[in-house]
């Protein structure tokens, strides 16, 4: 069952003592904007984001060297954001105007989070090497923990399609190679009834974030170690048209940061972390702008707010936000009627 306790005294001291502590949305006192900026790489970015928008730091003191803040997902009916603090084995809650509190502990060091069509929380758990769903009564349903009788590696990120099917990435992780049951990183699909699990591709070095185009005709998958986003057209059965695989964007560069989490807005623009910040890409992969937040990495991003026009992002230790003009694809997505 989710806990909704206030944040512990130890955690409050830790967060207050960390660089910047934590601040309420819109209160940037103590957070210099120097170095933070929104770069215009193409004039069309003006229709997506106001390049004079402030980049807000909402809270800090999470994660650490062994695991960052991750997995932001907006809970619209509650008006709050949930995100993972992986190393500290916690799920945190950010409420605009109120700040950050502890939402659940422990979490099996969950990473990526999303919601299914019924609004239930879906999580990629590191310690248990599984993908789970929390039912409305608080019980846990295991969506996936093995493939062909072998334990998964370390599920990372997850997205739910409008037909209820669940897609997730399973890269290798911190365990020694001989400790893995599976010899490859994979991207998987689980059917809506949880009865069928399909390996979609094992051709990635480090599969990480994933997202659908608004019409769900394209699946974008990040290969973090190659610093790339690759794109696939979808087949009617929910698998990938492998012959359509293509490089969507290369987000490498001389500055810190790899592509990690990724989200799409309702116009089909793709947002992803990369070298030096968060890139805004058009549906063809053209780089339109870059949100330079000043942190070494962008671990994940998620749209939220009452109008889905707040782009929340996590770094190793921080939670931040910036406002955009085009709403993100809502989570959960609307259910698609099956013919």
Image (tube, helix red, strand yellow):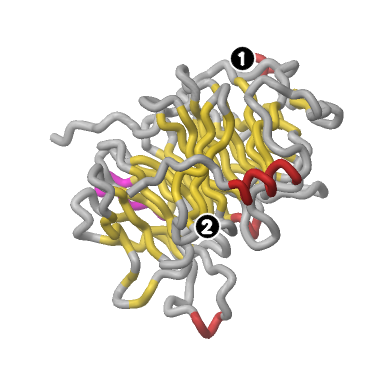
Looking at this view, name the residue that lies furthest to the right: 34
Question: Which residue is depicted at the point 69% across and 27% down?
Answer: 56
Estimate the x, y position of residue 252 in percent, counting from the top left.
72, 49
Q: Nearer the viewer, residue 79 or 38?
A: 79
Instruction: Report if residue 246 is visible in the image.
Output: no
> What secondary structure is the stretch in magenta mostly built from?
loop
1 with respect to 40 (left or right) = left
Q: Position of residue 286 (x, y in %)?
A: 64, 32
Q: How many residues crowd mark 2 within 10 Å: few (<14), some (14–19), many (20+)?
A: many
Tell which tag, 2 or 1, sits nearer the viewer: 2
Relative to 27, 236 lies left or right: left
Q: Quadrant of residue 186 in the image? A: bottom left
Q: At 47% across and 51% down in the image, what residue appears?
A: 157
**Within the magenta stretch, is there residue 36?**
no
Is residue 236 within the magenta segment?
yes
Kindly identify which numbered label has been placed on residue 202.
Answer: none
What residue is drawn where x is 60% and y is 48%? 69
């Amino acid at each position: 069952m989710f806990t909704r306790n206030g944040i512990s005294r130890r955690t409050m001291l830790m967060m207050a003592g960390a660089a910047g502590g934590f601040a309420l949305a819109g209160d940037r006192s103590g957070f210099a904007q120097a170095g933070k900026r929104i770069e215009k790489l193409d004039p069309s970015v003006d229709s997506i984001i106001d390049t004079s928008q402030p980049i807000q730091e909402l809270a800090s003191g999470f994660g650490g060297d062994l695991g960052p803040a991750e997995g932001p997902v907006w809970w619209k009916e509650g008006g709050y954001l949930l995100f993972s603090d992986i190393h500290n084995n916690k799920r945190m809650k950010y409420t605009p105007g109120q700040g950050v509190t502890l939402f659940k502990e422990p979490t099996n060091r969950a990473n990526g989070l999303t919601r299914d069509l019924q609004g239930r929380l879906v999580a990629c758990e590191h310690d248990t090497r599984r993908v789970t769903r929390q039912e409305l009564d608080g019980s846990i349903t295991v969506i996936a923990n093995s493939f062909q009788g072998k334990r998964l590696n370390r599920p990372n990120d997850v997205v739910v399609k409008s037909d209820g099917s669940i897609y997730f990435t399973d890269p290798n992780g911190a365990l020694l190679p001989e400790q893995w049951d599976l010899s490859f990183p994979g991207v998987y699909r689980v059917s809506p009834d949880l009865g069928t699990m399909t390996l979609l591709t094992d051709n990635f070095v480090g599969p990480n974030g994933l997202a659908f185009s608004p019409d769900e005709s394209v699946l974008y998958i990040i290969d973090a170690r190659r610093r790339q986003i690759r794109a696939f057209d979808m087949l009617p059965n929910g698998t990938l048209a492998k012959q359509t695989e293509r490089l969507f964007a290369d987000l490498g560069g001389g500055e810190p940061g790899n592509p990690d989490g990724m989200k799409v807005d309702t116009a089909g623009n793709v947002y992803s972390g990369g070298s030096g910040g968060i890139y805004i890409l058009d549906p063809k992969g053209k780089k339109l702008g870059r949100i330079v937040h000043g942190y070494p990495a962008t671990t994940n991003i998620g749209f939220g707010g009452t109008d889905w026009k707040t782009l929340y992002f996590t770094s190793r230790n921080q939670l931040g936000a910036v406002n955009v003009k085009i709403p993100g694809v809502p989570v959960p997505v609307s259910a698609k009627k099956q013919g």
